[in-house]
Structures are given as C-alpha cells and as structure tokens.
Amino acid sequence: MNNTLKKKLEAAEMWFIRRILKVSWKDKKTNDEVLDMANTGRSLYSTIRKRQIKFTGHIYRARGIEHLAMTGKINGKKSRGRQRTTYVDSLNTWANL
C-alpha cells in the first residue's frame, strides 16, 4: 500500500467515525476531538496490515498454485524506469526485513 492509499483509508475511517457519532463537518470539530469523543484511535490501516501479513503467511504455507503465483518469477526483461512496488516488497518493508 502506498501513502496515497493510506491517506484515503485514514480519511474514510474518520468519515465512518463522524457518521457513527453524528458529527457534521459544519461543527468544525478536529479529527483529534472526534477521536477523543469516540474514545478510540485510528486503527483501520494497522488492522488491514496485520490481516494482509496473516494472509500472506497462510499462502506461503499452502504450497499450492497460490504460493507459486505469490513467489513466482517471470522470465524476460524488466521494463524501463522505476519498477512498481509489488505486494511482497510492501510486506518486506512492513515487517522490516
């Protein structure tokens, strides 16, 4: 997940909390005030990250077609320019490997 997607998830999470508490944007409440009202913190992104890591462990232990798709290498030349961040690369950065 890149930073743009992370920001969108955090914005969506705040929107969910505001809708649950019925806090309008016209009330001029900051996100911190809304989180204090809800007695909670931002946890959506970390929950998604934990579940993705758990799912990846499940796939790596499976030794089926899913495992081959996740770890398989494609033969041939790489395209020019910066390579796209893959799912496995993002997991390695999250796990600090």
Image (spheres, rainbow, N blue to C red):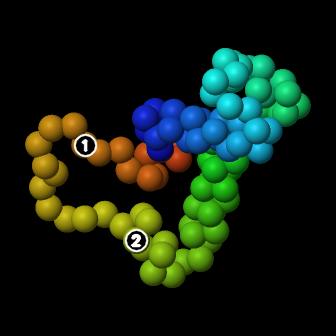
Q: Amino acid at mark 2?
A: Ala
Q: Is residue 62 visible?
A: yes
Q: Is residue 70 above or below residue 23?
A: below
Q: Is residue 46 visible?
A: no
The residue carrying mark 1 is 83
Instruction: Provide residue 78's location: percent of width, then percent of height.
Output: 16, 51
Quadrant in which residue 96 is drawn: top right
Q: Is residue 56 above or below residue 92?
A: below
Q: Amino acid at mark 1?
A: Gln
Q: Is residue 76 above or below residue 90?
A: below
- At horizontal 53% and vertical 47% (from top left) the residue drawn is 91
Instruction: Provide residue 56's location: percent of width, then percent of height.
Output: 58, 61
For marks 1 and 2 on the same chain, the one whose residue lies earlier in the sequence: 2
- At horizontal 43% and vertical 46% (from top left) the residue drawn is 89
Spot the residue most to the bottom: 64
Q: At numbered mark 2, what does the secondary structure look like: helix, strand or loop?
A: helix
